[in-house]
Image (cartoon, rainbow, N blue to C red):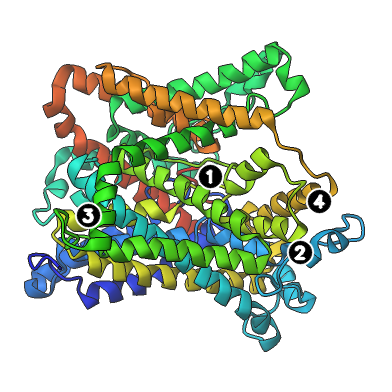
Amino acid sequence: MRDPSLRPVSMRAILIGAALIPANIVWCVLMERVDGRAFSTTASLFFTAVVSLLLVVLLNAWVRRLAPRRALSQGEMLVIFTMLSIATAMAGIDWGMPLVTLIGHGFWFATPSNGWEQSFHAFLPRWLTVSDRTALAGYYLGASSLYRWENLRAWLTPIAWWTAFIMALLWVMLCLNTLVRARWTEKERLTYPMIQLPVAMTAPDGALYRSRLFWIGVALAGGLNLVNGLHNLYPAVPALTFNGFDAGQWFTSRPWDAIGWTPLAVFPFIVGLGYLLPVDLLFSCWFFFIFWRMEKVASSAMGYMAEQPKFPYVDEQMFGAYMAIFAIAIYAARHDLREIVRHAVRGGGAMSDGAEPLGFRTALLGSLAGVALLTGFSYAAGMPVWLGALFFVVYFAIAMAVARMRAELGPPTHDLHFIGPDQSLTTIMGTRGMSGPTLGTMTLYYWFNRAYRCHPMPHQLEGLKMAQLTRTSPRGLAVAMGVAALVGVLATFWVTLHVSYRLGAAARITGWGSLGYGPEAYNRLAGWLATPLKPSAAGTWAMGIGFAAAAILSVVRMHVYGWPFHALGFAISGGWSMMWAWLSLFVAWVLKSVVLRYGGLRGYRAGLPLFFGIILGDFVVGGMWTILGLLFDIPIHSLWSG
């Protein structure tokens, strides 16, 4: 039964959110894919969505002065922000961008020398790809139009199927979020750090904007971005940053050269987000980043890397840690989940689903039906039923681990590169027993498993938390999120294809995302087919070690007060994005430790406006530089490179 005290989601909030989505998609695609020097969707909090929310807040303040009754409520503004976040994820560099790339790449770049046509074209379903070279010529070479029927016709069928696939993915995510939301939000009282800024920005009292510390933070970060942006245009202006300096150049002899490329960079908004995190997670992020580097040095010193270049299998260890985070979270919620199943099957019981986005029965059966649909989709594409089901069980375990870590501690980034179910299952089982169509389907699934930086599931859960804070109907929000996902997917296809047919995905578009994903996926497929892999005992052991290490860290943390090592820090600190973020999180750890040491909890709360200002100042001025760069074709200053 629906809770009558909840405010319904207004139609105007949904319409405003839907109307703002295409502009955000244009911004994201042009910035990340066409230009490729600045990124929003590789961080947990998308600056494009935050800047758009700020515009809504400013316009709403003007409306409140002229017609107070027509002003948006805080709940409505947060619904709009949630819609923008989910839609932006649809266009993200780890979601929509690689999908569009993979659809035609395997056919356009097939040559006699690489033998792709003979190797795997038969294993790529034509209803999920574009093989018409006439249509692909306009896409890759440009000077054409998407709206020519011969071009549009080639894309309509794969767009329709992939859109249905994506909506099924997000439906299962919403069902799973429904099953764990009450436990994580109301019983465990997880803190959801990533929602603190949008909630403060939209607070009815406007206290944030009256804080002197807030404006100091805006001036510090915004001024820094202003100067660095001017340096891009006029090199005579001194840069106030050393971002991108490689510490690895100091270590050139064996075994220390195993440290590899290690950028030193401080990003103001990462420092600001880091202030919202617990001290133990901040410490664990930079500590385990160094730990992974030292593990590589030790492996090189002992000669393991000479025999096995992937040693010490950092990605596999991180995958095991993610699985441990998922397993521990589910084990802790086992009694609640048992009660939910009882409620769904028999009705009644102590639990109520009136404050949930879906009824418990709908969520339970919907998640099973969704996985069955995705498995059937995979079977139609060429994957056996048992493997398709296993694939999505692993995928949603990763998704729930990402949602859990964001809800509990809010890391500014989480990537888990190159070790999704496609890679982990082939590591464990090898590829010798897998058919060509199975491997072809896994390759087409590369787009949502390459990395997990802009994963939509935590944005759903964070939206539900904001709805709880503002007494907004979660069922109305679920409808709004569905609209956002659908509009976002369609807008992503439209904007990406429109721009590509004008400029050429292999011509005037310079961003790495335009072509980079294709060789990764299809060269791997060609390698799988040419040289089938045996199961990797070392990789499988590494997954087990990562699982055990994260589990032990979690158990010890529960029983030892002040234990500084956090399993989440272990899980996220070995990836690409942490190379860019670790020094910023170290700075945040130092600052927060000093504040807590001398000011306690009161000092921490007093300092929040300063760090909110740092985040927002960095986002606004840095975001404006990206817009100016795109409008006037000038070098774009990147406020984030992760």
Badge 1 amino acid? Asn
Q: Which mark is residue 466?
A: 3
Disc 2 packing (10 Å; few <14; some 14–19; many ≥20): some
Check if mark 4's residue and mark 1's residue have beta carbons within 8 Å: no
Check if mark 4's residue and mark 3's residue have beta carbons within 8 Å: no
- The quarter in which the N terminus is drawn is bottom left
Disc 1 packing (10 Å; few <14; some 14–19; many ≥20): some
- Real-space Cα distance between discs 4 and 1? 46 Å
Mark 4 residue element = helix
Q: Which mark is residue 529?
A: 4
From the viewer's perspective, tell me whether residue 466 is left or right of residue 86. left
Earlier sequence position, callout 3 versus callout 2: 2
Percent x, y of residue 563: 31, 17
Residue assigned mark 2: 123
Mark 1 residue element = helix
Question: Which is nearer the eye, 22 or 519?
Answer: 519
Earlier sequence position, callout 4 versus callout 1: 1
Earlier sequence position, callout 1 versus callout 3: 1
Q: Is residue 34 visible?
A: no
User: Please, is residue 422 above or below residue 266 in the view?
Assistant: below
Quarter where residue 445 is shown: bottom right
Earlier sequence position, callout 1 versus callout 2: 2
- Real-space Cα distance between discs 4 and 3? 48 Å
- Nearer to us: label 4 or label 1: 4
